[in-house]
Image: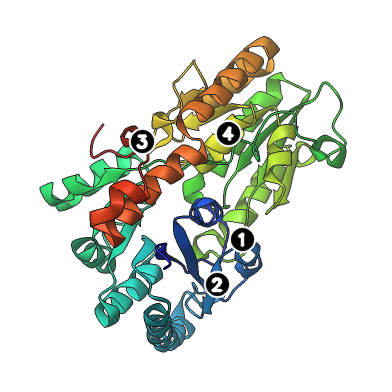
Amino acid sequence: MDMKIKSLLMDTNDAVGGVVRAHIMFLRYLDRARFDVHAAVHRGPLLPQFRMVPRMTLWTMDAGTKPANMCSGWRCRLTDLNSIFKLVWSAFRISLRCRKAGIQVIHTSDKKRSLLLTLLIHRLTGIPYLYHIHNNYVDYRANRMAMVQAAIIIANSGEMRRDFIQALGPSMERIRILYNGIDTEEFKPGLPSGLRAELNAAPDEILIGISSRLAPDKGQDTFLRAAVRVAGQESRVRFVIIGDDSIFSDNIDYVPMLRQMAHKSGLANRTVFLGFRRDMPAIYNGLDILVNAAWREAFGLVVVEAMACGKVVIGTQSGGIPEIITHGSDGFLFPVNDDLALADLLIELIQNSDLRSRIGEAARRTVLERFAIDTQLRALEKVLAEIAEPETSAVIANGPQAMLRTGE
């Protein structure tokens, strides 16, 4: 008799970000001896990445986000109406598949469409679900409804937990904290990198990067303003901007503005826009310093990935980043939008290679101790088992309690 827990992960994303990378990590590393793994994924550009996950049942659906050119006017309303029909139809089809497959627990992110699908499927089948907070979407009605009905709620940082308690009251104290984890063998120091050759960088040239989707809340403009200050003092520096700019409605004007900033400030020949890259371990290894300038990062998976590669990371004093980086020990922090503070830190690091090495080594140790995927997955498996089979959860998954807690 098959005693495996049958789990289903919902993903409606159209572009790679921290949530997608976390989902793929979960799917790859859930223990196949304990779990029969399923995923329902939007039939879009990310589907090939999910198809590469081994030993998993993949269901496709039409439930993605709107393209940027469909986010205003009559086309937006027409697209929304069409999306409702697609969403309901997808929920109906997935519900039938869930019943046939014997799904016991659904794992959903806080993306609106994933939540709407999960709520519909829950209503049709009664299957309990895990609500996984990746951002502070407290103002969406669908999110609030889903939180009420969720069997268990987990958040990717203590900051997100505090947000929900502050916004929705003491009932949110039931939220548990589970940090994201990464594969420390996939992201590690010393991996081959063609980045310097690709950029034709000189051996003594310092490469400073920022990696995230290109959007105002990610702070690439702060990065460029700091770059202007740094370039005025340091000649052997190149600035690398990595990230997708293809589908989001909040960056239609932002990306051209960034390119214009680089041109007008005289950085055009020293700033490279790499776009979306699938070879991020190699990219990190080719950089000397990574910056995360986000206004408010719920967790900061890019921060952990770069740290795992032994790189010194400078992140903002906001969101979940201060829960990852200890300032001056395994990385550095600066106030949001403070390009002067960022520039000062960059100049200090550019001029001190020993400091870069020491902080990078400490960063790698931090990731190994606190953010390794095996540790995080055992805790996630415990939660999924608790929802699916409460009476056997202690046997199915006995991950460390330290990684899954209700407070700090």
Give the foreground label among 2 and 3.
Answer: 3
> Does the residue at mark 1 contact the one at mark 2 (Cβ under 8 Å)?
yes
Instruction: Check contact, mark 3 vs mark 1: CB within 8 A.
Output: no
**Which one is nearer the viewer's eye here, 376 or 82?**
376
Q: CA distance from mark 1 to mark 2?
A: 9 Å
Circle nearer the viewer, 1 or 4: 1
The amino acid pointed to by label 4 is: Val
Structural distance between the alpha carbons of marks 2 and 3: 29 Å
- Counting residues from the N terminus, which is met first, the one under dot 3 or under dot 4? 4
Q: Which residue is mark 4?
A: 291
**Which residue is identified by label 2?**
58
Q: Please identify, in this view, whether the residue under mark 3 or under mark 4 is nearer the observer.
A: 3
The secondary element bearing badge 4 is classed as strand
Quarter that holds the N terminus: bottom left
Question: Which residue does the image show at 62% across and 64% down from the upper left?
Answer: 246
Marks 1,4: beta carbons within 8 A: no
Local packing at callout 1 (Cα closer than 10 Å; few below 14, some 14-19, many 20+) is some
Q: CA distance from mark 3 to mark 4?
A: 31 Å
Q: Secondary structure at mark 1?
A: loop
